[in-house]
Amino acid sequence: MRISSCSHRLSGSITVPGSKSHTIRALILSALAEGTSQIFNPLSSADCLSAARAVPLIGAKIEFTSPQKWLVSGAGKNAHLPSDVVNVGNSGSLLYFLSPVCATFEGWSVFTGDQSIRQRPVFHVVDAIRQMGAKAECAIPQSENCPLLIKGPAEGKNIVRTEGSISSQYITGMMLAALRMKGTLCIELSDPKETPYLTMTKIWLESFGAKVEMSDDFKRISVTPPIELLAHDCVIPSDWEGVAFPLVAAILTDSEITIENVDFSGSQGDEKIVGVLKSLGADIEENKSLSSLTVRGGKFSRLKNRGRLSTEKIPEKILRVPISDFPDAICALAVAACFTEGKVVFEDASVCRRKETDRIKVLKNELQKLGADLEDGVDERGRDFLSVRGNSPLDADGSPNVKFKLHGGTVESYDDHRVAMALACMGLALPPREKIIVNDAECAAVSFPNFYDEMNKLGCGFEECHARI
């Protein structure tokens, strides 16, 4: 599917779907528990449905009673080795969460997925599972990718030492696996990243009765399983990673929208996007009592800058964003940076290269096609960065900025849902008569089902192109 996006104003309200990260954690924990759990407001996206297809392989049962409620009959003590190959589809979360859990079963488990998953590294998972006392290897000799073979049970080894900078997801997987191990599993991390997701996992495990201790620097985590893991009703909060796209779309256009059912619990790292955008001059009003965000852009902004984003009031006139704790936000924020007068540098960004795509490379390639000025590289500490030198459409006095050079074009999503949504939102802020065509845009359904239809209710005017351009 190819989506056409051009200049539009947004108005109205939107409710973002439930969190993918929360939904998959809830599914796996409910599948391992004794009894029946109700999951309210689950995300019915491709990744979450992959998880829903996977957990019955270990003995759980799922009933989709309505779009807003799933029932999971947990396998509990009868949880068993997967009865078939576990195909995770496009879900890295499912791969990294469930594979350490399956290392606790006696026998061989096989994990694979789509083409994208088979290009993502699993060597760190292999090493961690071996430290847990099980066997693990890649099926293809000399490969560091899926198919992944695991032979359990993991037992007798309760200390795992790993870097932690590659991904937080396999750390979550080990924390989940600890629920089926004897004693306390201790995980020592030398360079933890995406730490809000580790906090999220801690909260979930504790809600099911586990004891979790986590040092302030996240370098030491211990998990002690409860005497009995019991079913637990779960309410899935809205997805901050999804909130990012209508948020940025409204900021960059003459718009006023309300995003409802926003999660202010602090359990999602992507909430930091609000602070980043406010530091550039965005007009965002948080109403925690109503769980909503009101976003005003352009002519609707109540601020003196009238919606103009700039780094001019920031020291050195450079905004430095350490992105390792919320790397999924880089797609939306990079688009916002293109319309910001000044320089924005996304630092400590190595983890962004190991997502559905190498997002640093992809964003640089595709945004440059549209006239953006980007640079990527490695800093003196050996950490990847992405630098965006943007221009606001307006000068400080409100007159048109002659330096503004962004334009339309045809871009690729690389089947990366967040890249597709970010590029579609970018088209909304281009000058009149300019448009962006996003190829293979249907991948947005991985985390935001019906994204284009829901955004069109705000007035985005996204249209499907039937001929490849």
Image (cartoon, rainbow, N blue to C red):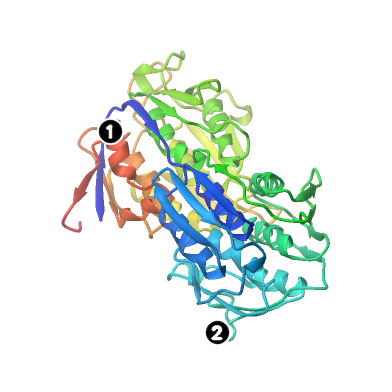
Front-lying residue, 24 or 285:
24
Do we see residue 345 in this rendering?
Answer: yes
295 vs 348: above or below: above
Residue located at (78% from left, 73% from top): 155
Image x and y of residue 291, in percent: 51, 26
**Residue 222: x, y in percent?**
80, 54
In the image, taking residue 181 as reference, residue 231 lies left or right, namely left
Residue under numbered circle 1: 457
User: Residue 340, position in %: x, y?
Assistant: 45, 32
> Helix, strand or loop at disc 1?
loop
Q: What amino acid type should be assigned to the residue bearing mark 2?
A: Ile
Q: Which residue is mark 2?
A: 140
Query: Going 42% across and 43% down the picture, which residue do you hit?
Result: 68
| Label 2 element class | loop
How far is disc 2 from disc 1 in space, using C-alphas?
47 Å
Q: Quadrant of the C terminus?
A: bottom left
| Nearest the eye: 422 or 310 | 422
Around disc 1, counting alpha carbons within 10 Å, would you say few (fewer than 14), some (14 to 19), or many (20 or more)?
some
Nearer-N-terminus badge (2/1): 2
